[in-house]
Image (tube, coloured by chain):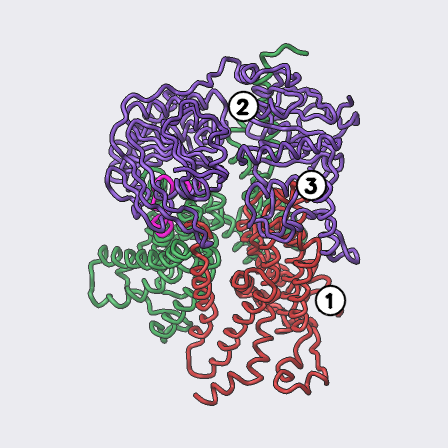
Chain colours: A red, B green, C purple
Amino acid sequence: MNPLLKSIFSTTFLFSVLRVATPIIFPALGVAISSLSGSTNIALEGIMLVSAFAGVVVSAFTQSLLLALIAGIAAGVLIALILGYFSLKLRADIILAAIALNLFSSGITVFLLYIFAHDKGVSSSLKSLVFPTIKLGVLAKIPILGGILNNQNILVYIAFLSVIVYYIIVFHTPLGLKIRAVGQSPDAASSVGINVVRIKLYALILSGVFGALGGLYLSMGYVSWFGRDMTAGRGFIAIAASSIGSNMPLGTLLGSLLFGVVYALANFLAPINIPSEIIQVIPYIVTVLVLTVYSARTAKEKEIGEE
Amino acid sequence: MEKFILKYFNLIRTIIAILIGFVISISLILLVSKDSFAALGYLFLGPFGSISRMGNIIELATPIIFCGIAIAIPFQASQFNVGAEGTFFISAAFGTAFALIIQSLNLPRFIYVVVVLAFAGLMGALWGFIPGFLKAKYRANMVVLTLMLNYIAYFISIYLINYHFRDKSAGFLTSYRLPDSVFLKQIIPNTRIHIGFLIAIAAVFIAYYFLYHTTLGYEIRMVGFNFHFAKYSGIDVFKVIVLSSMIGGIFAGIGGMSEVMGIHRRFLWQSLPGYGWDGVVVAIIGRNNPILIMFAAFFLAYLRIGGQVLNLLSDVPYELVSVIEAIIILLITAEAFLENIKYRITVKEAEKEVFKNESPS
Amino acid sequence: MATAISLKDIVKVYPNGVVANKKVSLDIEEKTIHAIVGENGAGKSTLMKIIFGIEEPQEGEIYVKGKKVNFKTPLDAIKQGIGMVHQHLMLAEDLTVVENLTLGIEPRKYKIFLDKKRANDLVKGYVEKYKIDVPLDKKVKELPIGVKQRVEILKALLRDVDILILDEPTAVLTPQETEVLFKSLKELKSQGKTIIFISHKLKEVKEIADKVTVMRDGKVIATDDAANLTEHDIARLMVGREVSFERLEEGKNIGNVVLKVENLNYINREKVQVLKNINFEVRAGEIVGIAGVEGNGQTELVEILTGLKEASNGTVYVFGKNIVNKSVREIREMGVAHIPEDRMKNGVADKAKIKENLISDRYYKKGFSKKGILNYPYIDSTSNELVKKFNILAPTIDAPVNALSGGNIQKVVVARELSSNPKVIIASQPVRGIDVGSEELVHNFIKDARDSGCAVLLVSADLDEILKLSTRILVIYNGEIVKTFNKVEGLKGEDLGPYMLGVKRGE
């Protein structure tokens, strides 16, 4: 077992943790900011999916990373806006609307995938682009951390930067204050003339941006193609990650890294003759356990029937 | 006229939502297909094209009805348990394993079928117990829990079947074939409609009666309306949360096994079939009422078969149907959809009442 | 004097069909304190919401300082100098006082960042100008309710309002805190502000108001100088008949001790000791009133007595049996009924049918169901009887509860609780927010229950109600019973006030 343990705690492993945590950090920030404003956003799955798809298609047809980036973000924000419109203006239940949008995203991406790439599984026939990796001489020289931090895709760095941006927005801008107020007491906010619906919408738009970055990373960084339902539940794991972190910036990051560790571990244990299903199920079981433990700790504050 | 609109408002709204869904899908087809009219024909009329196709509607509706009820029962308790997908799958997997294990007992057909279905129902109750209990005891988030459990159920089931009950002589990844004596018989020739369909219909009425005529059903609904009120009135909210998910699980479990016993005769799924999510869709359309869910399931199945015909015979992908469904659900779940019309009518009626005795100023 | 606000022919219809304002016309003069009184359902709250831009009228015109206005949101009203302090305080509990006060008008650095220092200075300026003291950096959830209300008032003043609307501001204050509030209001009036004051408390209205408007049934009945109307005049205008302020006639037969609370303690999850060594008894045939400002432990006491919370230690005996660890159902089956403080949260499931609400404590009992199957014919007939007996105005028993007005919703609660053949009734704020007619009805039902041998525990923040109904009065302050009055005849609110605020202690 020794070589196994060694490889687990190697820089390669930790490098892969960051890689794997990134597509969770982004949607987790998205869930967190929505939650702060009082909206439970479970549509990050669909948001990431459409952004992943838009990025691939636009980059293939325009061969422009910038346009792909814009398209991806626009797609994600569009889904978020539809969620906002239906749940805030038309008073649909936000969970049910999100379920509908996830279904929509799954369907429309495969539908259009077939139209564009003539394949219902993957987009390999399209020549889509990939976001660049960053190799900084300076970073390479740092012992240990250098190996982990250097050579990552640019979006991995952006993920960590996003956590900082999230912190600044929430605690140092008027918008962040309004979002927190709206989430704690919509009445208090509207009593001072704040448009509660508009603020919640802004929060959803921000979650659309964060989610979109996560989706773009998946199809243009983590791998270089779009595959049907490639998000594989990350949008849902993001919910667990952000609630573990109480929607706070550092907590959400740590929650996401936790799942990154588990995913990376699943990959590393594969070569040993353990059936892949047993390994693949680990992150999900861990989520359930963590969620249970976390909920158990705060259970006393809630009445039975609350969440 | 206005009074009629007010009374049947929800029904009218549902129908309009469906019509809008149709309009959008027609537009998409016109945009995308080289032979639009043929495509439209396949989508909307295809399902009626032959006995076998119409049979497909009923065959497809069967598991959807089971899952719709499986979702509706916890939903009536305001528990967002979306775990029917995983429950359906894992109960079918374990049920198949169980049926294979006991086949050497050579039970008479009727008993064999009932025992296997009961086992699957029990498995479903067990799998439903997990989120119900965790929610009741630890206030864990039901949506996230059941989403994760769906994946867990998937992996456990695939592992079980592929590594322990795999039929290596078959040309593809699947379980051993179930013995003939445990099949659910075909009931209409030239189709694959099986007894499971009758069981599903029975389930609809049992679920309806359960929800609206029994004390436990009453408790579930009151918890769903207002759990504070339920607790204050003396209802055991803990019990209700756990039981509503367990009972939902029973329906999903029986549904899963009945699908294996009636259609496939093997456990051959290598990915989640999606009936659980269809269940969410019809539960929403049917507003958690088992009888309305039954109709919604037929409607959804009709759409799906139309999509299959479309996919097979034209250049439009099946996934168009997911898009239609999503639009319909969105519109139905939007309470305020068309509400301003309802409001204006209500205001007119109310003003008529209040000012009718006052002389014009 | 100039007119601050003028309303002409306002009509407001709610989505459920209720016509809350029926062609209301009203003028409010500048620099006056103008009280608006009326039963609940009279339309006063709706009118205020329209003035403050929370609701829009279907018809009618609003003029502020002579200018016609059309408010779509509170922001529009605030821009015209109108501010509102709501009955249920609207503050974000997890934010600080400064954050709450500067919400929406945050001073900024470089346009997109918060300038926290300037925010502090801004608030300090207003605190000094209007002499209203608040702790700047504390989170709102840590403040007592009197201070929270001051924050609310400052919130309005910070937005430079000239017209301040106060909705039942003294509902949560003691007589002494009310004095402080009135002093502030007079100070504000002398600084040129106009104050609109909604209240049920006619004595206070007479004390502070310059002008009074009485509303009933969605219409304005009368507007006059406060000096020209007596409390009885106002009451008569409100209900259209003479209202008795008389005490209930004393109960005849006081029997044995039914409810006995012994050394009851409760420590909440924030580790605050909310109830300290509570001891009291209630006998059959008597009404024991617990007087106290909200937030002194009454809510928790009621929850423990009815099984909704578990005591930390101590015992509660009902007919000699300790109920401290028993479930809600077990306690109810012993004959304890509970009229809850928050009727919409606990008392009813408002989207469910009236008949479903009426059986929530008895659906499993003989007659209502058999072997788990509900017996609808029996349920329907008993529900119809209850509707008739308790005078519930409802279209049918299959209508959802949210189709009813507040008073009728409370009647549904009372109907269910009092028809359960109770031996003990725990009534918490039983007539809060309902019209005077329904209030009398409910009080009479409680009196009937008392006369038939029930032990009644009445918990109320309404001193008039306590003084009217109670056989004995206990004053609760800070989780302790600080004074017992065994004789209620001749007592006045001022006698209870000092104990309620902890200024005086007795035994």
- Where does residue C54 sit, x and y in percent of width and height? 65, 35
Q: Residue at x 23, y 40 (%)?
A: C320
Q: Which residue is painted at 68% across and 64% down in the image? A: A165
Q: Disc number at residue C131?
A: 3
Chain identifier of the residue bearing label 2 in the image: C
The percent coordinates of residue C32 (x first, y second) are: 70, 25
Judged from this view, the residue extending furthest toward the top is B359
Q: CA distance from mark 3 to mark 1?
A: 67 Å
Give the quadrant of residue A13: bottom right
Point out the image quarter for the N terminus of chain C. Answer: top right
Vertically, is C446 above or below A293?
Answer: above
The answer to whether residue B298 is left or right of residue C30 is left
Residue picked out by circle 1: A61
Q: Quadrant of residue B235?
A: top left
Magenta residues span B225-242
From the top left corner, tell me how far across and down residue B30 is, in percent. 66, 50
Q: Residues within 10 Å of mark 2 (few under 14, many from 20)?
A: many
Q: Amino acid at mark 2?
A: Glu
As shown in the figure, which amino acid type bears the numbered disc 3? Lys
Estimate how packed mark 3 is, as few (under 14), some (14 to 19) or many (20 or more) residues with alpha carbons within 10 Å: few
